Image (cartoon, helix red, strand yellow):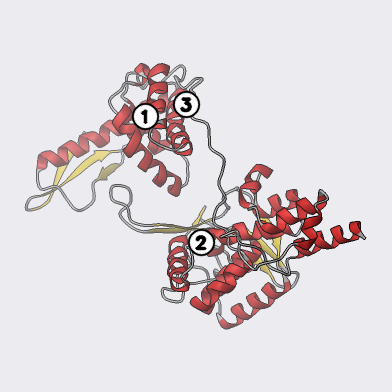
Amino acid sequence: MPSAEKMGPKKFRAVWRDAQGRKQHSKAPYYERKSDALARAGEEESKVRRQAATLEGTLPASTKWGAWCLDVWWEIRTVEPVTLDSEMSIVQTHLLPAWEDTELNKILRNPVQMWVDKLAAKYAPKTVSRIYGVFRASLLAAVKYGVLSGTPCVDIKLPKLRTVRSKPTMMRSDLDDLYPHITPSYRFALEMCFNTGMRPGEFGGLHRHSINLKDGWLNIRDVFVYLPRKEGVREEVLRYIKEYPKDEEAREVPLPGHVVDMARLWIEENPARSGCGIPHRPGNPCKSDVLFRTPRTGLPLSNRTFENVLRYAWRRAKLPHIPPYGARRGYATTLAEAGVDPYEIARLMGHATLEQTMVYTQRTPAARARIVAALGDHDAVQLQLVPGTARDASGTEPDSKALTDAQSDQAQKLA
């Protein structure tokens, strides 16, 4: 039975029992009024009863969507905290205002379609698809647990996704422009990402035992997750190592010789600690240190810190900002320009399909020259090369292997 426990003058905490009958209570700060503590305890016990009814298959279909989503579905989902974070924002901003007080069995297809159409008039197609995806998942879960016999999300017409635009890509010339404005530590971080295609979180979670300097291979499997404080969601900063990357499969990538030398020197100059000191999920013990720690805090490198460091550096260089992820795109684009097999690029990037890889390989002047030369364009041989970057599409490097090969092949055909 819900109750209120006095913790001092004008201080009460809510008390209730969980599904196993264990006593639970609210944490500080406490309530000033006993009635508020009792109300909170009542809400928590109602939540426990709904969860139990869901698992027993007895939760009524007349349950309101808001109660189903927040009290039941959200508590029994098995997804990453970072996913819960982003989707909770969607729930609070878009779903609760539209569906909170609607009973599950009164959510019908036509109202859902009308709601999607209203979203489409205001937001980009990709945003609409994301919002609808969370709502649809909540109703599919209601079907799964026997609360509903079917979902109203049938033949819902979503706005057509637009053609994906080229995204900021960091090529070798960009790195050369940036390096005078960042410290040697972050030059090392960028070189590692640019030469391996690691995501920023994968580099942050890279442990030393995953680097084979003898044979020149890197095993990418650990990801550093950093989640800041967020009002109403998380009271404290959360840091942990997730033992699988975004694609949920470890992958191996080769290390160029200069990167092996650079990593060896880094390890010599930065002795390892006894373990990384960051909790792992699942909770396997960790005896290896991470490769990189930020110079100021000594913590693994988070995407937020990496982003801030580069933002300030680009500003000092007076050049357009390219985020850390741009180094990963640069890796894929560099491999594509060199003629590496697309399926091999997809494997190195950790992509399940070539379509995913196509988003990362950006159009460059070198790629155009290679294509038009293959089609017999005599002008391709006479191209005047102007040094530039993939960022502003002003040109490509004069010693680009792909462009040099294209010119050579065409010259032989004309001879």
User: Residue 414: percent from the left, percent from the top?
Assistant: 90, 58
Does residue 412 appear left or right of residue 190 in this picture?
right
The local secondary structure at tag 1 comes to helix
Residue at the (54%, 68%) spot, across then down = 290
Location of mark 2 (residue): 322
First in sequence, mark 3 or 2: give its number: 3
Location of mark 3 (residue): 140
155 shown above or below 295: above
Gap between marks 1 and 2, in whole Å? 49 Å
Amino acid at circle 2: Ile
User: Residue 387: percent from the left, percent from the top?
Assistant: 64, 68
User: Residue 85: percent from the left, percent from the top?
Assistant: 39, 46
The local secondary structure at tag 2 comes to loop
Residue at the (52%, 73%) spot, across then down = 186
Location of mark 1 (residue): 52
Between circles 3 and 2, the one closer to the viewer is 2
Amino acid at circle 1: Ala
